[in-house]
Amino acid sequence: LKTADDCRRFLARLVNDMRCGKTTTQDGTRIASVVNTLLRAISDAEFETRLEAVIAEVRRYQQEQQEQQGQRRAMSETLEDDRWSIPQ
């Protein structure tokens, strides 16, 4: 079981096995508990991966904004310098 979807499919099969009597309710409950713990761990890891990607994208955006602001500031300073310079 490597993904959240794997865990969900396994749990669905387990429930069916319990209904058909292939797995006892006691064993099924124990197995389901372990698989649910695994499912939460996988889901948390997947969420963390997505969150890290969003954070990286926000940081890239912020860096771009800072660079653009610096370019605008430099342009503005250049324009002001040109305005006050005396032609020769």
Image (cartoon, rainbow, N blue to C red):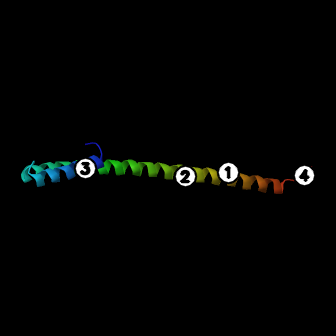
Tag 2, which secondary structure? helix
Q: Is residue 62 left or right of residue 43?
A: right
Q: Is residue 41 left or right of residue 61?
A: left
For disc 4, the marked residue is 87
- What residue sits 21% from the left and 52% below the top? 12
Q: Amino acid at mark 3?
A: Arg
- What residue sits 26% from the left and 48% below the top? 41
Q: Amino acid at mark 2?
A: Tyr
For disc 1, the marked residue is 71
- What residue sits 16% from the left and 53% below the top? 16
* Residue 79 vs residue 30, the one in the foreground: 30
Q: Amino acid at mark 1?
A: Gln
Question: Which is more foreground, mark 3 or mark 1?
Answer: 3
- Residue 37 % position (x, y): 21, 50
Could you say which disc has been placed on residue 9 in the image? 3
For disc 2, the marked residue is 61
